[in-house]
Structure formats: structure tokens, C-alpha cells
Amino acid sequence: MSYNGKAAYKSGSVFNDLRRTRELSDAVIVVDKVEFQIHKIILCNCSPYFGELFLRWSNPDQRVYIIHGPTPPLMQLLIDFAYTGSVPVTEDNVKDLLVAADKFNMTAIVQTCCAFLTEQLCSENCIGIWQFTKNCYTPELQVAAYQYILYHFEEVANSDELWQLSIQDLCEILDRDDLIVKKESTVYEAILHWIAHAPGERSGNFTVLLEKVRLALMSQEFITINVLTNQLVQNCGKCLDMVAFATRMMRHMTTMSVSGYCNLLARPRLPSAILLAIGGWSDANPIHHIETYDVHANCWDYLVESMQQPRAYCGAAFLNDCIYCVGGFGGAVHYNTVSCFDLNTRTWREVAPMHFHRCYVSVTVVNGRIYALGGYDGRARLRAAEYYRPETNQWTLVANMHEKRSNAGCTTLNNKIYICGGFNGNEFLQTAECYSPETNEWTMITPMGSRRSGIGVVGFADYIYAVGGYDGDVRLASAEAYNPRTNSWMVLPPMQCPRSNFGIEVVGDRLFVAGGYNGVSTINHVEYYDLSTGLWSSASDMGISRNALTCCVITGFRNVSQYAMLRDNLPVLFLEDDLNTEDFM
């Protein structure tokens, strides 16, 4: 990677020629007895440090300047940049180059090195890069490295670099709500991993580290098998008290069906993803409300910035830190419009409209493109498909589907699009088809076991899940999964509640369904399917009963805390006992 200079460096070849010929040279920089013939004005142009050195810190007639710190090869790179406006940055030289550029206040090189290191961040180097930033002023790189540690802690916890953290740094990291882990057991195991590097000197820190673990968020099985059997726990009365108190909290939370409290031992960490429930029908009207679901706190909240226009039967997609609401129905108009919500600025804007008006539209994302499939334009069901590219703000038509489909469900798996069920204007469909963006072709696949319109479809763990819907007679609770490798469907356990026109998404390792119509009324009930147990379980209900909604998941978003439940707003749990609970609040 190299830095490309601005237009001001168009004359760089002239300056470089003068340097090579040593014509008009007015100074010599000496580094470890190596001399560099330079022109003062050229170095002043790219470095305030040299401006001060030549104009204020030395005699104007001085010609030779001895520089301490960088090696001769590094100084050569810095001088080359001053004359050419570019510098080669590699894994081998980036840190030394950054330190040297920081010393001489060569901002452009510093920015280039920081950009290079940011792109190189991974679980094996993020701690080292974060610690490196403490030695030079690179606030953006420091934040990027620290956030990488927090957001990828499950991988970082198993890296050799974890051992480099001081007890103070490790405590600070483990104490944060925005430490992203699927299971709290990861935090506990990270502590053991850190201690194992130097057990003699680090075992004494176990108690203070265990206080940072949200013990009440673990399973009782893990505590029994992995925590209570640990020698460090058994040998420490305070640790045993913490575990006992956490166990009591767990029993209370199970009894009260509560997912967390403000207390440290039961304080949910922020999730890596937020589920959105968007629009729909409620009280016989389309609505513009958006609710956000925090899976770790198991609670819903309202997004203040609701859609600018009510939409039911629309589609939604998350792409590049934006939520796109596509098509739908406003009560009188079938939309071809698309609204975009920027999660960073928290503002709405309209982007390019689709070629077709699409109510009952199916929407998914493949390779940075938003696909809108089928739907109803107010007169006819559609087989037409198109995609949107945010970088060009344009919709492009692709090959038509084999079937007309409105109220179908679609998803993406392994860079292919799958669409299932729906209504063609005459019958409710059990057919399904697959689209390849590479060949722009649709292929029919094995039909589902049931006809399903108002179906929920999602790709999850190498399968396509088709859930619920309406078969023309009743709303369905049944579910089935498609295996692309065998081109076959298998029956899954049914949902607790039959439903059609509901929201469906995957959050973490669970498949969530929200709202819909159960054949009698519009509902706000939410449940999830756990792949590991094969069971459906209830989650917290939405604040609004709605059907014809769409769901979308925010993931990989750095400011997820803005859309999650405020942890300080969670209730405080008080358990009366001889145990001094204040130590664990």
C-alpha cells in the first residue's frame, strides 16, 4: 500500500531531479552517519517539525542537521515522501514508519499507516496494535483496534495476544457492556486462558477478574461442571459466595421469566445484532412504527425515527449501515418507492424508485445488492425481479421468475436467492425456485410439503426454512427446511402459534418469528426456534399487535448501543439474605 500525493505534488519529479543532482541543495540531514542532501523548503512543505527545526530551533545559516531516532532506511522513506508524495507501506515497516512519521508530524504518512493497520486488524494482532497506539497519537486507530477487541472477543479470547494484556486492561475490557459474546462462559474461559500463561503470578488476580463475569447469565450446568469444580473457585470464599449469589439470581430470573437486571452479575451485555419489526397493519390501518428487539435483554422498544409514511406488506433490507424499506401498501397506494434510514445519522431519505409498484413484495440481499421479487402492483401479480445498487442509486431488471408470486417469502443462502410459496392470483403456491446472480437464471426446486402464502422464509445454518403461512383454508403453524445439497424438504417441529404475514429473521443462532395473523386476530406474539434443541420458545411480545410487517436485522454495526436497551434502565434486583449483596451489585 502506498500513499498517493495530492495535486500539489505534480512538480515532484522536478524536485526529485534536483535532489538526485544535488542542485540547489541547502542542507544535509545526518542519521547514524548517513548523509541526505535535501532542500529545506521541500521538507517544510510536508512537515511542521522540519519547519520549526529550520526556522526556529537552529541558526538560519546552519547546513548540517543531526537527527536521532529513525534508522537511515526510515529517514530515506520520509524524505522520498517529501519529494514524491508517496510512500510504500508494508507489514514489515508500517509500525516503525508510523512512529517516525508521528515524531516528525508528517500527517499524511500517519494517516496512510493507520489506514493500513486498520485494514489488517484481526484477532491475532488487534491487541498488539491497540497497545502500540499508546505510544503515538493515533486516536482513530486506537479506537478501531479497541472496538475490534470488543466486537470480536470470542476469537480474541483464544488468541496468544490475550496474554499480553495487563490485569488493568483485561478488567476494563471484561467490565464493558459492549463486550460482544454469545455466551458469558466465553468471558470466564478467557480469564482462565489469561491466567494459564503465568499461573504463578496471575492466579492472585482471579477473584477480581471473576467479579467482571456476569455469572447469572450462564447456564446452571456450566456453573456446576466448569466453575464450581475449578480449584481457584474452591479455594476462595468470596468466589464461592459470588457463585452462590449468582445461582440464586438465576433461579429468581427463571421463576420470574426475566432475562437480566441492572446488577452486574445479571446485567446482559449488548447484543451483536438488533431485530427490527417494521410497519404492517394494526387496528385496521397501515402503520409507520418500528420496534427494536434486544435479544440479550429480551425486550422491545420503539425506534423514535419511525417511517415517514405507513407501509404494510413491504420488504426490508440492511445494507451499509442503512435500512431500506421497499414497496408495500399505504392503504390506498401500492408503492414503488424506497425509503432509506441511515443508522449513523438517524435520518430518512428517499432513494430511486423501483420499476414496478410492489405490494406483498419479497426482498433479500446478495453481494451488496437489494433484490425485490414479485408482488402485486394493484392490478396483477408479478413475476418480475429487479435489484438495487446503492452506489449507483439505480434499479436493474433481471430475469423473470417462473411463477407469478405475491406474498411469497425469499432469502439468500450461499450467494443464491430462494423464493418459496405465495399467491399467483388463482391459487396458493407450494412451489419454490432458486436464482443465480452469476447466470441470471431461475431454477425450479422441489416443492414444499404445504401450500404457503404469507409465508416466512429465511436461510439459516445451510438450510432454507419455510415457516407458517396460509394454505387457502387455515393459518399454519407447521415448518419445514430445504436442503440444497439433496434438493429435499424435511418436516420441523411446529410453532407454538399459527400465523401468516409475520416477520421472520435469524438473530444469533435462533430463528425468530414476530406478529402476524393467526386466523382470528392480529397478534404481537414472538417466538424463536433453537437449532440446538429443536424447540420453539416464547420471547417477549412486541408492543404492537401487527400483521403484514417485515423484519430486518442490524448486524456488524459499530453503534449498536444506540438501538439496544439501556442497561442502566434495567431493574435492580434485591435478594434479602445474610449474604452481603452490595459486593455484587
Image: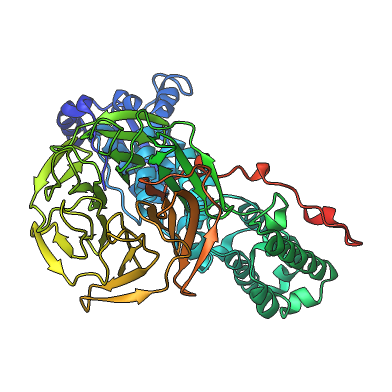
Q: In this view, does 451 lie above or below 573?
A: below
Q: In this view, does 260 lie to the left or right of 452?
A: right
Is residue 12 rendered to the left or right of residue 247?
A: left
Which of 257/272 is in front? 257
- Res 120 quadrant in image: bottom left
Residue 181 visible: no
Judge by depth and name the residue closer to the eye, 346 or 208: 346
The residue at 38%/41% (across/down) is 280
Answer above or below: position of 458 versus 45.
below
- Decide if residue 327 is in sight here: yes
Residue at 35% across, 25% down: 44
Q: In this view, does 270 lie to the left or right of 521?
A: right
Q: Where is residue 520 in the image (x, y as percent from the top left)?
A: 43, 52
Q: How is the image coloured?
A: rainbow
Percent x, y of residue 503: 38, 51
For this rendering, which residue is in front, 528 or 416? 528
On screen, residue 371 versus residue 70, left or right, reads left
Tally of numbered discs: 0
> Which residue occupies the extreme right position in the image?
578
Residue 191 is situated, as x and y percent measured from the top left of the image, at: 64, 67
**At 65% across and 70% down in the image, what residue appears?**
195
Quarter where residue 239 is shown? bottom right
**Residue 394 percent location from the top left of the image:** 16, 36
In this orientation, which residue lies closer to the viewer: 188 or 422?
422
